[in-house]
Image (cartoon, grey):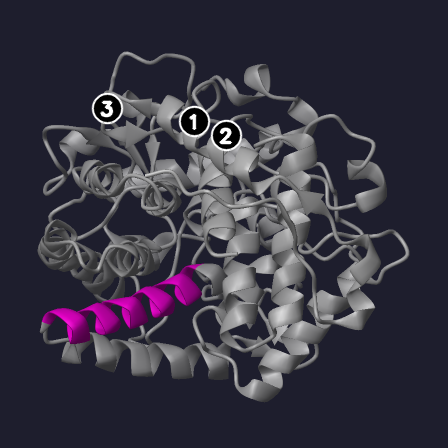
């Protein structure tokens, strides 16, 4: 199926968001290019890599968004994307952040041999995987596929059969990653947050002493394939390896890791995705006649704990909670704003979050919405991975949240600003949030022909 959409201008209904400056794009061409990228990035006909040069395996939440993109023109591929991803699910329900379908690829660290998943009881034997997970987006992606193809018996059958796999992932998070039974799952590695080198983690990882012999020798390849100034630092990578080694020592057992890990965080984005995916499973259960009482109980507790524990009044937003040091990581960054998509905030708090987003567009520097980190903070870096750039999937989540609360004008501004960036700078991994700078650039940052960028474009245009 090819979706024809005429060229259009997307306007906002908020007068302070510069109606006269809203971009005009060619949606038909963007849609076609996005289709081509997803198709070209598909390997072995059944799974999609984020970017062939930089990330040559299947990634967890990347493939969730990829499945959403495929659902707009190829439902079979959307379903196959999820099936190939869940081939890596462990018996306890954990879904790894990388599935190494091929062992022949070289030039990526940490590759399939590093994680030693084949030594872990309950890990799949047919495929090697990593030992950490990523934000659980799969419930609402499954719901998206269902809603787009609800009249297809094949899709309905797939969703019903696939439902228990996602449920098992959620059950794992509540059983192994919630030591105080609060309804909030912890992560023990920055990569599991999806926001690898976010300034959120800087102060925490500084407290982790690395002595000679704590980490094995390793060789980075990412800096050879992308601009090193845009990538995490060597110190960042040493911490990543230290925490991976800790996970290996405990065979990635969440309960054992919780007793030792210096990095134990109840993250905003991770838990917002869990809450929204719980909600999606409840919606699907109602459609398909599946009992979801267990999920309802989880979500009632999770929503309350998120709202009560993670809100920081002085910031006017949510913030992750450091379990080991028993305090908030009180910094403003984009993960907090995905709580809107999960339907967590009260109307009053949602208004506070929306008003902050609107101020970004009115700044003299001409910031696009929404950068990954607080542009008023001294550590903000508009080129450095998660320390400031705009990320496609995050802006999609923010858009969905704004739209959910009825903030249509602000939501449309997020959408149109993002589509304009891709139209001008290509389907990159992330982008400079400064309009005055981005308008002078020839391309975005990080990997090119990026899969989830294509997926977000497809969904934004299809639903315009």
* Residue of label 2: 33
Instruction: Give the Cα distance between marks 1 and 3.
Output: 14 Å
Disc 3 vs disc 2: Cβ atoms closer than 8 Å?
A: no
Give the dominant element type of the magenta stretch: helix, strand or loop: helix
Residue 333's disc is: none
Q: Is residue 315 visible?
A: no
Disc 2 vs disc 1: Cβ atoms closer than 8 Å?
A: yes
What residue is at 23 percent from the left and 81 percent from the top? 297
Q: Quadrant of the N terminus?
A: top left
**Does residue 314 appear left or right of residue 30 in this picture?**
right
Q: Give the answer, above or below, for where 125 lies relative to 352.
A: above
Q: Which of 115 and 387 is in front in this view?
A: 387
Q: Give the answer, above or below, for where 448 lies relative to 161.
A: above
**Does residue 166 appear left or right of residue 223 in this picture?**
left
* Residue of label 1: 36
Q: What stretch is highlighted in magenta?
A: 270-288
**Residue 153 quadrant:** bottom left
Tag in front: 3 or 2: 2
Q: Is residue 177 visible?
A: yes
């Amino acid at each position: 199926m090819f979706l024809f959409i005429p060229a259009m201008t997307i306007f906002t209904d908020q007068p302070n968001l510069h109606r006269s400056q809203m971009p005009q794009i060619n949606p038909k061409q963007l849609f076609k290019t996005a289709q081509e990228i997803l198709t070209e990035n598909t390997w072995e006909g059944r799974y999609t890599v984020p970017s062939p040069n930089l990330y040559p395996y299947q990634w967890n939440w990347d493939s969730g968004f990829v499945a959403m993109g495929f659902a707009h023109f190829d439902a079979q591929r959307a379903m196959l994307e999820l099936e190939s991803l869940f081939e890596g699910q462990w018996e306890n329900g954990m879904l790894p952040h990388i599935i190494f379908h091929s062992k022949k690829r070289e030039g990526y660290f940490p590759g399939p041999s590093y994680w030693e998943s084949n030594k872990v009881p309950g890990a799949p034997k047919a495929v090697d995987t990593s030992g950490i997970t990523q934000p659980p987006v799969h419930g609402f992606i499954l719901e998206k596929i269902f809603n787009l193809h609800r009249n297809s018996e094949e899709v309905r059958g797939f969703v019903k059969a696939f439902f228990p796999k996602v449920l098992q992932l959620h059950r794992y998070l509540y059983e192994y990653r919630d030591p105080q039974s609060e309804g909030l799952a912890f992560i023990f590695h920055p990569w599991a947050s999806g926001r690898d080198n976010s300034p959120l983690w800087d102060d925490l990882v500084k407290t982790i002493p690395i002595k000679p012999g704590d980490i094995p020798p390793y060789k980075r390849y990412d800096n050879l394939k992308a601009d090193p100034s845009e990538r995490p630092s060597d110190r960042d990578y040493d911490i990543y390896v230290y925490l991976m080694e800790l996970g290996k020592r405990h065979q990635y057992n969440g309960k054992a890791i919780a007793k030792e890990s210096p990095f134990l965080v109840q993250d905003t984005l991770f838990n917002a995705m869990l809450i929204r995916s719980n909600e999606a499973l409840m919606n699907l259960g109602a459609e398909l006649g599946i009992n979801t009482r267990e999920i309802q109980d989880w979500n009632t507790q999770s929503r309350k704990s998120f709202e009560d524990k993670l809100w920081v009044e002085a910031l006017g937003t949510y913030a992750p909670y450091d379990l080991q040091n028993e305090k908030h990581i009180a910094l403003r960054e984009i993960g907090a704003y995905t709580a809107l998509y999960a339907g967590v905030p009260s109307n009053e708090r949602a208004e506070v979050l929306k008003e902050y987003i609107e101020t970004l567009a009115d700044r003299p520097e001409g910031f696009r919405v929404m950068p990954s980190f607080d542009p008023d903070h001294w550590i903000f870096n508009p080129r450095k991975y998660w320390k400031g750039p705009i990320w496609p999937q995050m802006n999609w989540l923010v858009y969905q949240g704004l739209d959910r609360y009825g903030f249509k004008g602000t939501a449309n501004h997020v959408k149109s600003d993002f589509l304009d960036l891709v139209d001008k700078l290509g389907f990159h991994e992330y982008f400079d949030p400064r309009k005055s700078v981005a308008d002078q650039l020839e391309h975005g940052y990080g990997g090119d022909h990026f899969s989830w960028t294509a997926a977000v474009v497809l969904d934004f245009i299809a639903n315009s």
